[in-house]
Image: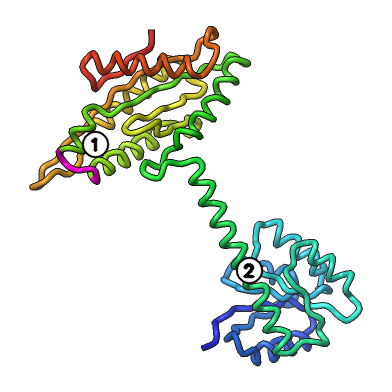
Amino acid sequence: MRTPLTVLAIDDDAADLELLRRALEEVPDFAVSFLARHDAASGLATLRQQPVDVVFLDYLLCGQTGLDALRQLRASGDQRPVVVLTSKGSERIAAAFLRAGADDYLIKDDLNANTLSRSLRYVLEKHEHARQRAQLEAELYRLARFDDLTGLYNRRYLLDRLAEEFLRARRYGSPLCVAMLDLDHFKEVNDTYGHLMGDTVLATVGGVIRATVRATDIAGRYGGEEFCLVLTETKLEGARLLAERLRRRVAAEPFPAPHGATFFVTCSIGVAPFTPDMRNVTTLLARADQALYQAKAAGRNRVVLAG
């Protein structure tokens, strides 16, 4: 069974277009849907408007060169496969196309089902490998920075970002606060409803945190049921208001219990501001953690400010 493939050919020579179309019909590997455009503008417009798997591009076009069209295509972020059609003795032009981002080139006099089949397989496999590589890199990026369960930053990346913001606050005097959040009686959730429900609670709280903090804030899972928020360009009162809003939202989130019932969880939050006397990040974290301890000792489900 032949693989469906949509091909766009951009060439101002009708005879060359017909030659390419006939040769593509004979390619055994693919069932080709052939689109033809006679100038770069209409060809690029087609690429914006409908799905195309492979582009065949001639060098000489009405109004501009195929090289110009290719540069426009790549500058727009379009990375689909491009095969350049050249005449014999035009290897220098073909090399310029390859440097500009073309994937392969074919000499028009050599066009036949075999050369087209080899070229199509090559450029499609090349782009599939590039897609898989990009997907792998994106996954590695995610694993290096994010906690799978909550969708927040992981502890390592969180601390790296906190160190950067700490140095910026020391150098420029910009306000910075850290909030430590811990779920109250979380062990009882696991013991009563099971660890899967405990994971659901953590994931939901992660979503509540993401929906509450600003885009410029840095929120991460610090460990277990504890979370850390790095609130950039934020004074203590602003941090208190955000922490209080977050505390209320967590307490209002219902979770399903057996027999149609629901249960709720609360959290305690300790907030500490950066002060010029602090020598390192550890001091700032320790003050926020101490405030969190005071919130727990005072009855939980509350926000306490350091100092």
Question: Does residue 99 appear left or right of residue 255 in this picture?
Answer: right
Q: Do the residues labelled 1 and 2 touch (CB within 8 Å)?
A: no
To which residue does mark 2 refer? 47
Could you tell me residue 153's position as x and y percent?
45, 37
Q: In this view, does 306 lie above or below 36?
A: above
Q: Which amino acid does label 1 sit on?
A: Glu
Q: Which mark is drawn over residue 25? A: none
Q: Residue at position x 41%, y 14% from top?
A: 287
Q: What residue type is labelled 2?
A: Leu
Around disc 2, counting alpha carbons within 10 Å, would you say few (fewer than 14), some (14 to 19), or many (20 or more)? some
- In the displayed orientation, state which residue is furthest to the left: 259
Q: Residue at position x 70%, y 89% from top?
A: 113
Q: Residue at position x 58%, y 57% from top?
A: 134
Between tags 1 and 2, which lies in front? 1
Question: Does residue 26 appear left or right of residue 229 in this picture?
Answer: right
Could you tell me residue 288's position as x and y percent?
40, 17
Q: Nearer the viewer, residue 287 or 12?
A: 287
Q: Give the residues drawn in magenta, as a range.
A: 192-196
Q: Residue at position x 80%, y 67% from top?
A: 97
Q: Which of marks 1 and 2 is nearer the N terminus?
A: 2
To which residue does mark 1 refer? 253
Q: In this view, does 101 lie above or below 143?
A: below
Q: Is the magenta stretch mostly helix, strand or loop?
A: helix
Classify mark 2: helix, strand or loop.
Answer: helix
Could you tell me residue 120's position as x and y percent?
66, 78
Q: Could you give the CA–CA distance between mark 1 and mark 2, rounded to whole angstroms?
A: 46 Å
Could you tell me residue 307's position as x and y percent?
38, 7
Q: Residue 304's quadrant in the figure?
A: top left
Question: Does residue 64 appear left or right of residue 300 in this picture?
Answer: right
Question: Does residue 117 appear left or right of residue 273 in this picture?
Answer: right
Q: In this view, does 154 lie above or below 107?
A: above
Q: How many labels does the image show?
A: 2
